[in-house]
Amino acid sequence: MSDSELLYDVNLQQLPAEYLQATWRVVDQRAGKDPEADWSDATHLELGSHALHLQGKTIPSLTGSWTIERSSLLGQPYLALELPHSNTQALITRFRRSSDGRRRLLKLYFRSGLELELTHP
């Protein structure tokens, strides 16, 4: 296995927003007790410099905005996600990347209990 195929954990307290800017594909999800409809239907998520585009199986493409914020107590990063009809937050529970940065893995945990695992590319 080459070094570019291995994924390394990134210290979440030092995670820069630039690492999140990519087109992500949902590879796994676990629904919580009352998951947000738009997010539980997601297949792709594109994070630009501050804009987001969400695509789903049955929903039309949605455009919104996002920021990375940190818990004041632990410094744990989370995403503040704004869509036309809803605002939510998702805790970043894991971020991994290859040494060259081309491959990345992102795990998000929403307040509703929904968990999304996303990969780039």
Image (cartoon, rainbow, N blue to C red):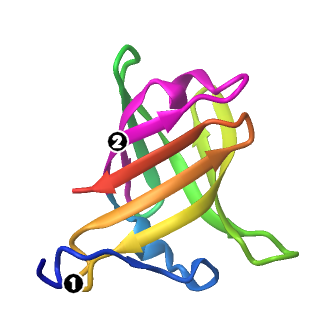
Return the residue found at the far top.
58
Q: Which residues are magenta?
A: 23-48
Return the residue found at the far front.
1
* Residue 100 tag number: 1
Task: Classify the position of the N terminus by image quarter.
Answer: bottom left
Mark 2 element type: strand
Between 37 and 10, the one nearer to me in the picture? 10
Q: Residue at x 11, y 81 (%)?
A: 2
Mark 1 Cα within 10 Å, few/some/many (few <14, many 20+)?
few
Return the residue found at the far left.
2
Q: Nearer the viewer, mark 2 or mark 1?
A: 2
Q: Residue at x 38, y 61 (%)?
A: 105
* Residue 27 tag number: 2
| Residue 73 spot, x, y in % from top left | 88, 75
Task: Classify the position of the C terminus by image quarter.
Answer: bottom left
Horizontal relation, residue 55 to residue 2: left or right: right
Q: Residue at x 50, y 80 (%)?
A: 16
Between 12 and 62, the one nearer to me in the picture? 12
Between 5 and 120, the one nearer to me in the picture? 5
33 to 100, vertically: above or below:
above
